[in-house]
Image (tube, rainbow, N blue to C red):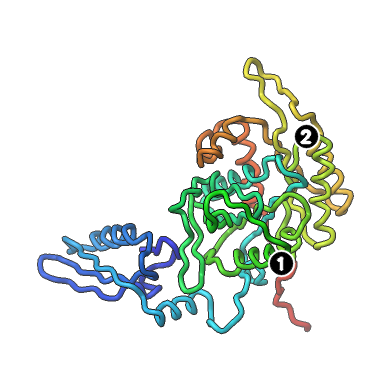
Amino acid sequence: MLDPDIHRPITELGMVESIAIGEAGHVRVGVLLTIPGCPLKDRITTDVTNAVLKVPGAESVEVSLGYMSEEQRAKLKEQLRGSAGAEKPIPFNDPQSLTRVFAIASGKGGVGKSSITVNLAVALAQRGLSVGLLDADVYGHSVPRMLGLDGPEVRPTQVAGMIMPAQAHGVRVISIGMFIEGNTPVAWRGTMLHRALNQFLADVYWGDLDILLVDLPPGTGDIAISLAQFVPTAELVVVTTPQLAAAEVAERAGTIALQTRQRVAGVIENMSWLPCPHCDERVDVFGSGGGEAVVAALTRAFGVQVPLLGQIPIDPRIVSGGDEGLPFVLEHPQAPAAVQLLAVAESLAVRERGLAGRPLGLQPA
C-alpha cells in the first residue's frame, strides 16, 4: 500500500517494522509512522489491514503503530530528497523534470483567476494526471476555501523538514492560508514573498507531478518575477474578461514574459457572456472582444501566435461552488461553462514541454 502523504509504498519508506504470522492466519504488523500524532494514522491502519487481508491465508490482522526515530526520519528525508547537507533544490527547475508548470496570471483582480485555476486543476486530475496547485496569491489567497480545505483541521504535515501538501479532489495543494489562523492578513514585503515562494517550491514534497498550476497574484509584482527566477520554464496563462479596460491590463500581465523570457501558453476569457435563462441568446454583460484583443496584442509582441484557449460563460454556480468547496466542473460537468473549462484543461494536458533549458545529449562529431 502507498503512504497517503508521500504516495510511495510503505515498504520502500522503511515504515514496516515487523511482520509476524501466528496461528489460525493471525497476522501482526508493526508500522512506524513518520511523526508522532500523525493525522492519517487511522487511515494507515485501515489500509494496512485491508492490504494484508487480501493475502491468501490471512484471516485476521493486528496493526501496532510506532514512530520513526530522528535517525530514521533523516534517512527517509535523504531517500526522498538526497543528501541532507545539500542545498534544497527546486525540482521543477531540474532540466530533467517532465513537470509542466503553468502560471495563471491576470492584470487585475476580480476576473475569476482563482476560480479558473481551481477548476482547471480538478479537471486535469480527473483526466488521471498527477496535479499540484500552488496558491501563490499570498495577499488574496482563496484556493483553500474553493477546494474545501479551509477548516482549522487542515494543516499540511511536516516530515523531517519537508512539507506534505494537503489533498482535495485528486489535487495536491499548498497555500499560505493553511498556515495562518482565521482570516489574519498577510503583511509581507518583497523579500518575505520571495522566500515564501521558494519554500513552497523547494520544501514541499510534491512528488512526481505531470502538471503544476501556480495561482499568481494580480499584476506584475514580486511573486511573478520570483517565479520566473525559480522556474524559468513556467508558462503563463493569462485570464481576462471581455471588457476592453480589463484586457488592456491583462496585456501587461502577459507581456512581462518578454522581460522574464517565458512563454505564454494562451489566454482565457472569463465571464464571456450570460446565457439567457428564457431563450438561447447570449447577453454580453461585460462587453465583448477582450480575449481577442489580448491574443492579438500578445501575438504582435511575441511574434508567434498566442492561442485563445477558451471563453468561459457566466454561471452563478461557479461562485456558489467555490464558496462551498465544491468545484464546478465536478458538480455540473455538462454546463456550458464546465464544457469550456474541460476543453481548456484538455489543451493544457496535451501540451508538450519545450526543450528550453534541457540538455539534448548531443556531442560534436
Position of 114 with respect to 157 (left or right) is right
Query: The C terminus lies in which quarter of the figure?
Result: bottom right
Foreground: 1 or 305?
1
Q: Is residue 284 above or below residue 345?
A: above
Q: Earlier in the sequence, mark 1 or mark 2?
A: 1
Three-letter amino acid code at the position of disc 2: Pro
Q: Quadrant of the N terminus?
A: bottom left
- Residue 275: where, in percent of width, then height? 66, 24
Please report contact status of discs 1 and 2: CB closer than 8 Å, yes or no.
no
Residue 156 in the image, given as x and y percentages of width and height: 48, 60
Q: Position of residue 230 (x, y in %)?
A: 70, 67
Q: Badge 1 local density, few (<14 within 10 Å), some, or many (20+)?
A: few
The span from disc 1 to disc 2 (Cα, nearest Å) is: 35 Å
Q: Position of residue 3 (x, y in %)?
A: 40, 64
| Callout in the foreground (1, 2) | 1
Q: Quadrant of residue 228?
A: bottom right
Q: Which mark is residue 242?
A: 2
**Residue at point 46%, 63% (across, down):** 157
* Position of 361 relative to 352 (above/below): below
Mark 1: which amino acid? Thr
Q: Residue furthest top?
A: 278
Q: What's the mark number on residue 191?
A: 1
